[in-house]
Amino acid sequence: MADLVAAGIDVGQRFLDLGLAPSGQTTRYRNEPSDIARLVERLAQGRVARVVLEAIGSYAQPLVLALVEAGLSVGVVNPRRIKAFREAEGGRAKTDRLDARLIARFARAMPEAIRPLPDATARALKELSTRRQQLVAMRAVEKTRLQQAREPAVLESHRACIASLDAACAAIEAELDARIRADAARLEAQRLLVSIPGIGPRVAGVLICDLPELGQRDRKSIASLAGLAPHVSQSGNAPPRAMIGGGRPCVRAALYMSALVAVRHDPHFKASYRALRDQGKPAKLALIAVARRILITANAVLKTKTPYQSQNTP
C-alpha cells in the first residue's frame, strides 16, 4: 500500500486535471485526442495501479476508452461517493486540481472502485435504451398536453407529435432487438428472462441493457443495484425503518410493471402478493416485494442458465 500509486482525473468539457497519490502532484491536459494520448502514456509509464474518474457523462468517454485500451485499471464512480469522501476528510475548498487530488486519494483508499467496464456492445445497448426511455417520457408529456388542449390546431399538433414519437420509439426498439439477436449470449439471456412471469421482451431488454451485472452478483447485491433492496435506518430508541432507494430507476420501474402483471397471471407470485396483503402490508409495498422476488429469480435463472420453474423460485 505504501508504494501504490493511484491517479484521479477531474473531467471537464475542455480540460482534464490529473492528480496523483500519494505525491499530490497535479497536471492539466486538454480534453482532446492528442492530450488524452499524452495523459494515458504518462500513466502507463508511471506504473499507476488505479485510475478513478467521476461518472459525469460523455465528456469522459474518449478518455475512459483510451485508458481501457492501454490496459490500465479504471474505475468510474458516482460523484456522490467523491463528495462524501471530501466531507469525511473535512475538506471544503473545491477546485478542479483539488478535486483531482481528492479523487486520487479516493482511488488509493477504495480498491473496490475498480470494476470491469462495459464493452462496446454494452455501451451501445445502454445508449439505445436510454434514448428509448427519453422518447417514452416525451410521449407521456405530449399525451398529458393532448388531454389539456381544446384548440383543433393544437390538438392536431399534439397528435402528430405523438405519432412521430411512436415511430421513433418503434425504430429504437427494433434496433435494440436486432442488436440483442445479433449477440448469442444476450439472445440466450433474453430467452431465459422471458420464461419468467411478468417479463416480456421489452422488460428483458431493459434488464439486458441497463443491468448487465444480472446473473453475476449475489441476490443482495443485485437487489441493491436495481434499487429494490430495503436499507435499514435506525438510531437510539427509535424503531428501525427499512426503505428502498438509489439504484437504477429504469430497472426498478420495469420490474414494478412486471410485478403488476405477475400478481395477476402467475399463481406463485399472486400467492406471495396475497400473503403480504393479508399481513396488512400496503399494496405498493407488496408489489415492490414481488418485483424484488422477480429480480432475484431472474438473477438465479441467468446464473444457472436454466429457464424459470415455479417450484424452484428463490
Image: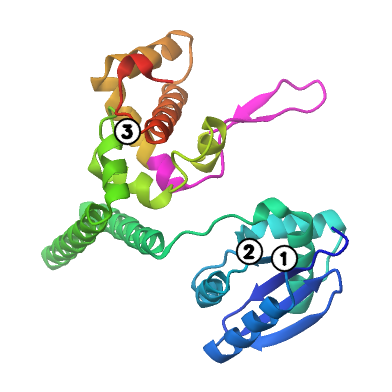
Q: CA distance from mark 3 to mark 2?
A: 37 Å
300 or 230, nearer to the observer:
300
Residues marked 3 and 1 touching at CB (< 8 Å): no
Residue under label 3, please give it. 258
- What residue would you read off at disc 2? 73
Which segment did they paint magenta? 229-253
Q: Is residue 47 left or right of residue 258?
A: right
Viewer-side residue, 119 vs 8: 119
Circle nearer the N terminus (3, 1): 1
Please count the marks in the image: 3
Residue at coordinates 41% horizontally, 51% vertically from top-left? 210
What residue appears at the point 82 percent right and 25 percent down from the top-left corner? 236
| Vertical position of residue 308 compared to residue 213: above or below | above
Question: Residue 27: which disc?
Answer: none
Q: Nearer the viewer, residue 72 or 25?
A: 72
Q: Earlier in the sequence, mark 2 or mark 1?
A: 1
- Amino acid carrying label 2: it is Ser
Q: CA distance from mark 2 to mark 1?
A: 7 Å
Within 10 Å of the Cα at label 2, are there few (<14), some (14-19), or many (20+) other Cα atoms?
A: some
Residue 140 drawn at (x, y percent): 28, 53
In space, the residues marked 3 and 1 are separated at their CA atoms by 42 Å
